[in-house]
Image: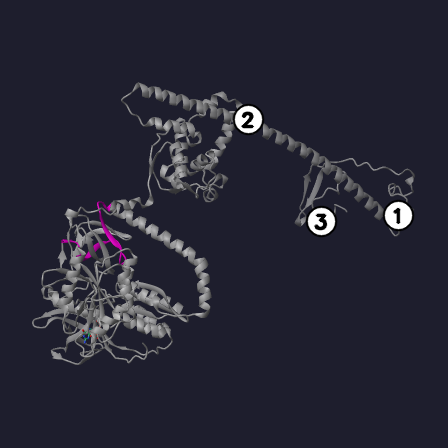
Amino acid sequence: MSDSDGKKTLGLRGAPARPGNVKQSFSHGRTKNVVVETKRKRVVVPKPVGAKTGTGSNASLGDPKKRPAGITDSEMERRLKAVQAARARETEEAEARASEEKARAEDRERRRAEAEAKEAEERQREENLKAKAEEDARRKQEAEAAAVAAAAPAPAVQPASAKMPNTKGGAPAPVARKKEGDREETNKRNKGNDDRRSGKLTVNQALTGGEGGRQRSMAQMKRKQERQRQKAMGGTVEREKVVRNVNLPPAIVVSELANRMAERVGAVVKALMTNGMMVTQNETIDADTAELIIEEFGHKVVRVSDADVEDVIKEEVDDPKDLVTRPPVITIMGHVDHGKTSLLDAIRKAKVQSGEAGGITQHIGAYQVKTDNDQVLTFLDTPGHAAFTSMRSRGAQVTDIVVLVVAADDAVMPQTIEAINHAKAAKVPMIVAINKIDKYEANPDKVRTDLLQHEVIVEKMSGEVQDVEVSAATGQGLDELLEAISLQAELLELKANPNRAAVGAVIEAQLDVGRGPVATVLVQNGTLRQGDIFVVGEQYGKVRALINDQGERVKEAGPSVPVEVLGLNGTPGAGDVLNVTDTEAQAREIAEYREKAAKDKRAAAGAATTLEQLMATAKADADVSELPLLIKADVQGSAEAILQAMEKIGNDEVRVRVLHSGVGAITDTDVGLAEASNAPIIGFNVRANASARATANQKGVEIRYYSVIYDMVDDVKAAASGLLSNEIREHFIGYASIKEVFKVTGVGKVAGCLVTEGKASRAAGVRLLRDDVVIHEGTLKTLKRFKDEVAEVPSGQECGMAFENYEDIRAGDVIEIFTREEVVRTLD
Ligand code: GDP
């Protein structure tokens, strides 16, 4: 208990002589005296009367007899002291509490008074403001009445400010200030503090939105700073109010409404609240409510529907006297191997003067032929039902006539029936082409009777459907077929108005490395011209060039003419409709609207998937095994056709799941995705680029190449049934890259190549790849090593190659050399 030992730290108890002094001791013997304010309380302890004992110091210890046993006097004294100290502390605390309570009550009272004063002041100010606004309005009206001729837009502003006092700057402040007393002064000071605080934008404020946690945009901050600057420069400045035309769709988000009016979001929310609408800035309000608010802010309402942007391309009805006959558009459909491709090729070869363009025939997805009686017919060069339906599902009905191919040595098959149903669904007339009539086992009458079962009654069976016996192999009956088509076209009275803005449908579209996005468009009405501005699906552009099916540049394309269109900003989808617009702004607006609408639709569909479908698939997954696939194709049309074909494959036990389908070369990304899902990659007329090839090899990802959809479908079917062993039907032999192209008289174009992989073989099949996309497949005309014709050229050596019937070769192209092995299929 001694304070002189120098070890005790701060304490009160040890210095009775100087009660306000405390001695502090530090290390190395340093000490310090600190004067502390001590509150001494007199503690009144009642003295027990008969407690006088000899020990004096024990005066207050009570009767030692009553003490519990074993407690010494000193112990008793210590306890007594402790009791006294505790009592003293209690009294002290009670006193402190009382005074604190009092102070708090006073503070509350003061604050209430202040608040009341403030409120009164606010009310006063508002009244003044209203009075002033009314006065202003009255004066303006008078002024207006005086100046009859002058139509000033300003009055529109004033009523707004009268109604919405809070949206204005501090304009009415001076009026109020005059009438306010000292309280105004304090208020002003407080306000000044506020201003100073918000003027300095702290990171915290910026992040949390400053006062009240409200989000402040950059623009808001700027406006605020500007207001303060103006205030500092010359008191309050009345800003010129701009009356805006506010485009109002059927529903609008509050913040967007504020944005369109260029008003503060907070002000708009407030205005809505005064109108009884409790909404936040992210909620959507209907057009009627929004109109009310817009008028309150003094702006003009322009009601629009989002879809209104499409109005500029609304279908206009042509005057019958403007209409002229247009060529029919024909699609060839039928069962696999019944000869669709052969028929298209036969018609094309027979009727297109391919010699004119140096023998180079262009594949653009459609071509035109002229019959002997000068009738022009447009054939869609994409056989198959998938292409037909995918186009139709996108709203493009391009086909006027369906030619149904049925092989005479076979009969009506599942896909024949499918084709019949498609044609019927699209209400497109049919012509039956009974093919392979040259074959010995051909039995055309069986085909005719077979068709009866499917409600197709051909003319020979006294029906209405024209039937023609043809042979794609010999060319027999081709003219009759074309004749039948012309006749059908005449019956249909197909007409169009060439003198109007063009409307067309995309047959195929692809991203060409050199030319950018390219779309083959079949003009359906009007005339598409170079320089026309258009919107097509979610894309838009200006026609930079038009290329016809002969590969020639043309200035314009009329009804039923297929052309390649260059000048798009992106790749549209097959079946997308093209419309010519007046201005680029219109085209862009429509494209953007459609893109947004499509995105919203996808988002909505995605949301639906998450709940119900996910459950359904999860359930289905339990007992269905899946074959995941990744598909890359040369053109959008093929990708879609493949996708649809793949979706159809599968039964209760197996199912094909396409992870991704796209256009262009197979890349590292594709390989990565395939590896992650343990899926093979299918390349349709495209190849993997060098790096993707290496990655695939390394990671063991299988890449299969196809150029015939049906082969692919068959293989996938087999794989899905778990029955396809890794048999290879096509053997890769080598790659050669073209270094230079020479023109040799008598031979044509010859490619100077370097064999980069494997070997080149004269007898093998060859494909020409440009940017990893197959652009030609055929055979070699020559394979030369120096001057000699050779059978093979090994890797690392140079050679000269020329293609049979194909001359569009360029330096940088790659030649793929392969052989095909006919594999007897054990599956159907
Ligand atoms: P697609 O699958 O319907 O396009 O049929 P293709 O055009 O690929 O023809 C399938 C097979 O039938 C090919 O081997 C053709 O050579 C053959 N082919 C097509 N048309 C005829 C024909 O008129 N006569 C004969 N003999 N064979 C034909």
Q: Can residue 702 be seen here?
A: no
Classify 775 as above or below 20.
below
Residue at point 32% right, 21% down? 144
Mark 1 surroundings: few (<14), some (14-19) or many (≥20) residues within 10 A: few
First along the sequence among labels 1 and 3: 3
Q: Can residue 763 be seen here?
A: yes
Q: Are marks 1 and 3 in contact (CB under 8 Å)?
A: no
Query: In what element is the residue under mark 1?
Result: loop
Label 2 sits on residue: 117
Left or right: where does residue 801 sit relative to residue 38?
Answer: left
Q: Specify the amino acid type for callout 3.
A: Lys
Decide if ligand 1 comes within 8 Å of the CB at mark 2. no
Q: Where does residue 225 sit, x and y in percent of width and height? A: 41, 35
Question: Which quadrant of the picture is home to ligand 1?
Answer: bottom left
Query: In what element is the residue under mark 3?
Result: loop
Label 1 sits on residue: 67
Give the number of the mark in front: 2 or 1: 2
Q: Where does residue 674 sit, x and y in percent of width and height? A: 36, 68
Q: Specify the amino acid type for callout 1.
A: Arg
Give the number of the mark in front: 3 or 2: 2
Label 3 sits on residue: 7
Give the number of the mark in front: 1 or 3: 1
Magenta-tinted stretch: 555-584
Query: In what element is the residue under mark 2?
Result: helix
- Mark 3 and mark 2: Cα distance apart in space: 59 Å
Q: Specify the amino acid type for callout 2.
A: Ala
Work out whether residue 288 or residue 543 is closer to the camera in this orientation and state it.
288
